[in-house]
Amino acid sequence: MSDFPNCPECNSEYTYEDRGLFVCPECAHEWATDNSADEGETANVKRDANGNPLQDGDTITVIKDLKVKGSSLVVKVGTKVKNIRLVDGDHDIDCKIPGIGAMKLKSEFVKKI
């Protein structure tokens, strides 16, 4: 009927796949698919807006005007930022922007130079 494996906890045949995990609707057990082990290794790679991998020390350019929360400052399109540092979290780039100071940026709003 389906190509999904039976649940390892309750041996149910009604399992389904959801976002890289197999899920059992009867006992609510979740386990990783075979492909998710490969994805887990590459999930830590941060990528810019164009899909290029970012590394510590890279130079990036901002691709969208970004308002600085709590002030009237704006990081303009084309602002060049040198020597970035990658961190975990929603804002995954730590950097020092000329004229503004230390900030955290999202990798989706930058491109690698």
Image: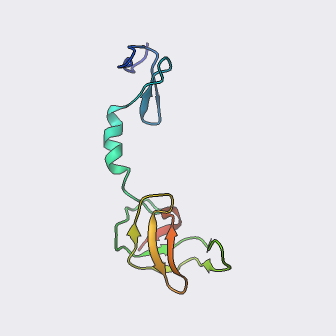
The quarter of the displayed image where residue 83 is located: bottom left
Q: Is residue 88 left or right of residue 106?
A: left
The quarter of the displayed image where residue 48 is located: bottom left
Task: Find residue 97 and report its horizontal and vertical position in percent.
Answer: 50, 80
Residue 49 seen in this snapshot: no
Q: Quadrant of the N terminus?
A: top left
Q: Residue at x 48, y 63 (%)?
A: 107
Please determine whether, in this image, residue 108 is positioned above or below residue 73. above
Residue nearer the viewer, 42 or 99: 99
Q: Quadrant of the C terminus?
A: bottom left
State the scheme by which the image is colored.
Answer: rainbow
Most distant residue in the right direction: 72
Please determine whether, in this image, residue 70 is positioned above or below residue 7. below
Q: Residue at x 62, y 74 (%)?
A: 68
Please determine whether, in this image, residue 46 is positioned above or below residue 4. below
Q: Residue at x 48, y 75 (%)?
A: 61
Task: Find residue 44 and report its horizontal and vertical position in percent.
Answer: 37, 54
Task: Find residue 71 and report its horizontal and vertical position in percent.
Answer: 66, 77
The quarter of the displayed image where residue 54 is located: bottom left
Please determine whether, in this image, residue 81 is positioned above or below residue 28. below
Number of marks in picture = 0
Most distant residue in the bottom direction: 99
Residue 24 seen in this snapshot: yes
